[in-house]
Image (cartoon, rainbow, N blue to C red):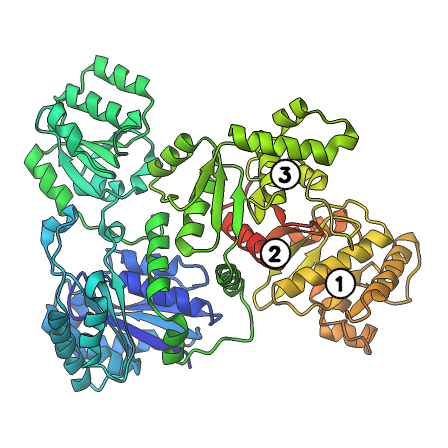
Amino acid sequence: MARSIYITSAEGHSGKSTIALGVLDSLSRVAPRVGVFRTIARSISERDYVLEMLLDHDGVDLSYDECVGVTYDDVRADPERALAEVVERFKRVEAQCDAVVVLGSDYTDVGSPAELAVNARIAANLGTPVLLVLGGRQQQGQMEALGVTAARSPQQMGQIASLAVGELRRSNVELAATIVNRADEECADEILDAIREHTPDAPAWALPEDRLLVAPTMGDILRSVDGELVKGDETLLSREALGVTVAAMSMVNVLPRLHEGDVVIIPADRSDALLATLTANSSGTFPSLAGIVLNGAFEVPEVMQRLIEGLASSIPIIRAKGDTYATAVRIMNTRGRLAASSAQRYNRALSLFDQNVDIAELTRVLGVARATVVTPLMFEYQLLERARGDTKHIVLPEGDDDRILRAAAVLLERGVAKLTILGEPFEVRARAIELGLDIAGADVLSSFDPAHVHRFATEYVRLRAHKGVTYEKAADLVTDVSYFGTMMVHLGLADGMVSGAAHTTAHTIRPSFEVIKTRPDVSVVSSVFLMALADRVLVYGDCAVVPDPSSTQLADIAISSAATARQFGIDPRVAMLSYSTGESGTGVDVDKVREATALARERAPELPIEGPIQYDAAADAAVAKAKMPESAVAGRATVFVFPDLNTGNNTYKAVQRSAGAVAIGPVLQGLNKPINDLSRGALVDDIVNTVAITAIQAQGS
């Protein structure tokens, strides 16, 4: 039976979605199949955005319809029948999962006192312990959008906890843990002490207030004012609006009142205010704004439209029909939604949960032990955890690529690595702010910085003097971002480099061959892919670098791949692949693999190596029993070494596409310091994983 947790609260707007996401993310690290279930939804016709967000989480493989219990109408019409339906539908989900996150109702209909009792009764009938979420802020309505909220005192939080816990006990529900969301950070310890007086047998944690998580996005505001986007970058509608400024005064008085992340409300007939606001936003000497809302039934004059076009501003400009007061009220009443579409908010929520909740204690309380199988998602979590364990400094040369900036924001938010991003500092930071990304924790460095160029050129001349390299040529060469980043790694200014999102593999790794060079015990730089299958992770090499390795190089690849496997917690059992198994075949290609196997065994006698061996004999225990029954590797191989690049590249792609495996890499191996290449089609998650891998390699170098 799956272990499940029922997340409920004592009132509405407590931030259960943030807690549910954090719990789901935590369980996904240790349980292969995690499900979600919403007990009471608002209606059948209106889809539940929180449930949709949780279902979008990697590793959850359930449809929306099977994860909904009943609606409020069902509960009102026949409470007993509704309860029976919830139990029945939950059991179907539970049967498919190792752990289930159950989300209680949203306090939108029944009313707080009665609704907690309803949730407690459902939890009791599901046999599921409760994680109680308590809101650390008073409900302030429209003032909340302006950041005006009243923090609850420890005494108030203790009283709320007492009432909520009493209700749970009356329903004979087990309290697993309590989380105070949006707590006053200055008295968090006192709040937890007050909570623990009423919950002595259950752990309690507190998450501090974070304005970003409650602020509406420009997309939320667009929907709230029933407006239309008349100009600007549609992707920037995901940026959060952290405040509201009404441009009703002269601009001399409005401009000093602009703050970072503001949405500015401007009457559509105030062309002067619109132009001044756009100019201020583009100037670099004023805060970066989230967006502009033009209100009123006025057309922007054609000459002004032309002038605005010439400013080439990407800030979203929304047109709303209402007057200034009505528009302002609607915007201030707009609540932020935690959704997968807002990457920064999504990652901020996960980071906040990680930093303030003891994940190991939480999973222990829930009775979820770490599984023996390793899913792709679990492996990716392990990468991030290992990288965080000993933080390294990684340089990202492609600061002009939005994917790099988005990945950098995630990496910094999750504490995976220290970062240096190459690019012109003003341009890089301005674009990040425009995208609504926080990269303040990263260093941003121009590859034309004269002090660094001089130092790098001098060192490059020393390294390449035998090739006749002059200082002038070196000074020009090191301004190339790949050379600049490589020189940073070489001179210890960074521990590793990740590039290739916008550059070829050759452009990324050529400088490392010249500067970083191979390790003394390695004759060739090669690569592996970490192939995350449904229940385990395998290592494939070489699938990206060496076209036709010699037997000596193949032996090198085998030993390097085994070492890489160990770095990532994979017990290496090496299969030297060929079209024949054992002594059954002959020919030049088979002989090369046979010779490489002998060389590898001679150089690493402690390493389990088998070859030549066919893929099926290496991977399938039944085939191995027939073909190589005495082998310690056959049927159990974890490291697969391909005879050439043609075979390796096609095989990893075939497995990736046909078996649904997640291919992480290529991971370069054999260099003195870690440099890794990205695919030019790399997604943000690919970049995050590759940086984590590079950081882990740096830990062992």
Q: Which residue is drawn at the image coordinates 11% and 39% (left, top)?
A: 328
The residue type indicated by label 3 comes to Thr
Question: CA gap, disc 2 to disc 1?
Answer: 28 Å
Asked whether residue 78 is in view, the answer is no
From this view, report whether residue 276 is shown above or below residue 204: above
In this view of the protein, which residue sits in the foreground, 113 or 210?
210
Q: Which residue is drawn at the image coordinates 30% and 29% (left, top)?
A: 232
* Residue pointed to by mark 2: 697
Residue 340 at x, y = what percent? 36, 52
Question: CA gap, disc 3 to disc 2?
Answer: 18 Å
Camera-side mark, 1 or 3: 3
* Residue pointed to by mark 3: 508
Secondary-structure class at tag 3: helix
Question: CA gap, disc 1 to disc 3?
Answer: 32 Å
The residue type indicated by label 1 comes to Tyr
The residue type indicated by label 2 comes to Gln
* Residue pointed to by mark 1: 615
Secondary-structure class at tag 1: helix
Disc nearer the start of the sequence (3/2): 3
Residue 313 at x, y = what percent? 32, 25
Residue 127 at x, y = what percent? 30, 83
- Label 1 packing within 10 angstroms: few (<14), some (14-19), many (20+): many
- Can you name the residue that lies furthest to the top here? 303
